[in-house]
Every structure is written in C-alpha cells, then in structure tokens.
Image (cartoon, rainbow, N blue to C red):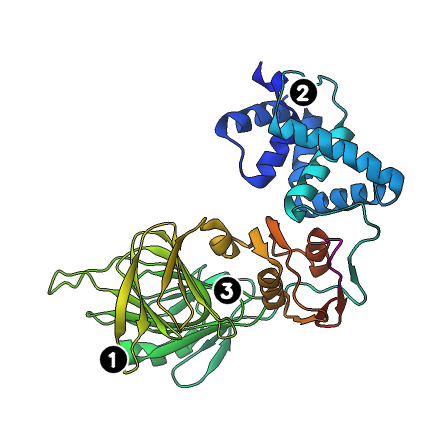
Amino acid sequence: MESKQTDISVLIFKKLQETITPTELTVLEQWANSAPENRMLLDHILKEEQLITDVKSFDDLWRDSIGANRYKKMEQAVLSQISTPTRNLWRKWMSYAAIIAGIAICTGIWILNQRNLMKGEHAITAKTKDAKPEGNSAVLTLSDGREINLSTTQEGIIISDDILYGDSSAVLGNETESIKDRSDLKNYQLKLATPNGVSYRVTLADGTQVWLNAGSTLYYPVKFGDAERIVELQGEAYFDVTSKTNKRTKSKVPFIVKTNGQNVRVIGTQFNISAYEEDAETLTTLVEGKVAVGKSAVKGGTRKETILKPGQQSINNLANDILVKQVDVTPFIAWKDGLFYFKNTPFEEIMKQIARWYNVEVIYKKGIPKETFTGKMNRSLSLSSVLELLNVSNVRVHIEGKKLIVN
C-alpha cells in the first residue's frame, strides 16, 4: 500500500504547510482513522500552541554540543526523507515520540528558515509580562460625530436600513431611526476604525464585504448612489466587491477605493490594499477579477490607470510609475483569516505586522537585520510564542513593556 511507502511525519509536516496533495491527505486520514491513538496524536500535533511547545521542548535537547550533533543527524534524516521518499520510510511500529520529533524538526526548519540552532542560547527572550493581541473594540463613528464601541464578541456589522451585527442584533438600538429618517442616505457618511490588535468586517449597503486589518480606517456612505460607489481607506483592507448594475443605463456601477495618492476602480472582484500612512508604498494585490489602479490626480480624479490580473500586485511609492509584479497572494491576504503568513519576508516587514497586531513599538539598536522568514502562525498566539518561532541566532529581541528591543 502507498501508506507503507510514506513517512507519516512528512505527511503531517505537509499538512501543516498546506502543501499536502489530495492523495497524501487520504493516506494521512487513513492512518489517523486506523487507531484511536493515531487520531489523538494527529489532533494533538495540529494544535498550533501545542506544536510550539513540542518545538521548544525539542529545541532544549540540542542546546549543548552533544545536542547539536543529535540535531544535525535528525535534521539530515528528516530532510532526506522530505526530498527523496523511499519504500523503506514506513515503520509499522513507529514510535509516536519519533513522529513528534520529526514534526518538531520539520516545523522548526520550515518556520525559522535556515536557523542556526548550534550557536548557544535562545536569541529572543521576554523580560516582562507577555503581550496578547489587544482586546479593544472597533469604533463606528456616525455622521453626527457619535462614536459607538462595537461588540468584541461579534466579527462584523452589516449596513442596511439598520446597522446590524452578524447575528441580526441592532448596533444602535432605537437610535437607528435617526438614520432611516434621512432622505439622502448616500451623503450620510460612516467611519469604521480598528485599533492595533483588532480586525473587523463590514458588509456595505450593496453587499460588498470589507475586512479591515489592525490600525485601519474605512470611510463609506450608508447608501451608494447609482453612478459610482466610493469608499476611502487608511491602512489595510480586503475587499470582496459585489457587482452592481445601474437600472436606468444598464451599465455596471464602478466601485472605487481611494487611498493616499491612489485610486482603485473595480466592477466586481476580490483584492487587498495595504496603504498605511507610515509605509512608503501602497500595495494592491488582486485575488480574482480585474481592477484598474491609478495615481490620484492633484485636482481629483485618476491619472493613467494600470490594469491588474489575478495574482498580480501593484506597487505605488507615490513618486514613480506604478510597478506591477506576479506574486503568491496568500501571504498578503492571510491576515483576513487570522494568520501571520511569511514567505521570504524581510525581518522589518515582519516586525511591522507584529507591532500593529500586538500594539508594541519596535526599536532597532544596531540597524535592521537582513534575515528573511518563511512560515505561518495564528494571530491569536501570545507575543512570546510568536517571537519564539522567529528566534534566530543572529538576532536578539526582548520585550520591555510595550517595546520590542532588537539588538
């Protein structure tokens, strides 16, 4: 059988990477279902926080010179299995501890990206109380200036005649009447703002869904007009735009996202825009459909537009022409699903994401490290857990209150 030719630890590693094929997944599920203890082990390993504990436990085993040699041998064995699977990899009575060891090594190699574990103590330490993702709420600001702290137990709001949570409960209660009585709803502007450590979703009046990342603000009307649909963004958001047709002209109603120095025009599509004020570049990443990206004209409107196809990303640095490149969209949209996802990501960019999510300030004592990282982590993890997985021998980072000190 094929399962007898494949090492289970490699399949679990591929499952964690989300690179497992349907055939391999079938093999893994057959193994897990063959015995209750197998299923318990698989569920145990796939729990991310438990996996971190396992990786850290095995990390402790090779801190000294003897452990370094042990790690080197195990690393070579695991890597050889991943690169060249053979018929002899399966062991009918494989030790469960050996499986976890294999996973710990694989995951450590995968997440830490060429980490040198043979050079002494851990690089990243916490000196004070650990940080968790912020628990503050998103804030909805009404046209009259009233601010509503949105429920932290809800994932988003829906804009219609009323403003509702996803479970259909009212956000404003009886105060909603003050909105419904207005005759010109398209001029009734709302603002949704997310503090650091909070993401939130809003379903606009036309059915368009917008996921707002931490430290971002979206301006939008209660109701769109028939000629065009315009929203303004500061920060980062993922858009799933609903196509809309003008009933009178039968033409498509464009959806326009305005950011600092850029306009994105769409008809119906999914895309991500990262336009934080502190970043030098605005990134627009197209998942599906088609968008036209253009620089904002000085007196309004849009200059020459660049058309993006799925899998393309535009880079607007506000000085030169808009550049376009082909990308793997996953790292740029994973935040929407509650993940940090790094793929050869520079250290500085990783620290920016961590700073926004955990509401901390990053201070570089000796310049910005040149390391890059590949891997993914759940954004619900504590800060120390995230730093542990990014632990590299050439970089030292420690937590001091609300600051990350990089030496």
Q: Amino acid at mark 3?
A: Asn
Precedes in sequence: disc 2 or disc 1? 2
Disc 1 on helix, strand or loop?
loop
The picture quadrant where one finds residue 171 is bottom left
Query: Is residue 96 shown left or right of residue 21?
Result: right
Residue 395 located within the stretch drawn in magenta: yes
Precedes in sequence: disc 1 or disc 3? 1
> Residue 213 has which mark?
3
Q: Position of residue 357 (x, y in %)?
A: 60, 65
> Residue 194 has which mark?
none
Disc 3 on helix, strand or loop?
loop
Q: Is residue 403 above or below residue 5?
A: below
Query: Is residue 72 shown left or right of residue 339?
Result: right
The residue most toward the top is 1
Task: Determine which residue is flagged by label 1.
Answer: 184
Disc 2 on helix, strand or loop?
loop
Question: Is residue 40 in view?
Answer: no
Q: What segment is highlighted magenta in the picture?
A: 392-397
Q: Position of residue 237 (x, y in %)?
A: 44, 64
Instruction: Give the mark toward the camera: 2 or 1.
Output: 2
Q: Spatial distance from mark 3 to mark 2, Cα to Cα?
A: 44 Å
Task: Determine which residue is flagged by label 2.
Answer: 89
Q: Main secondary structure of the magenta part?
A: loop
Q: Amino acid at mark 2?
A: Leu
Q: Spatial distance from mark 2 to mark 1, Cα to Cα?
A: 70 Å
Precedes in sequence: disc 3 or disc 2? 2
Instruction: Give the mark toward the camera: 1 or 3.
Output: 3
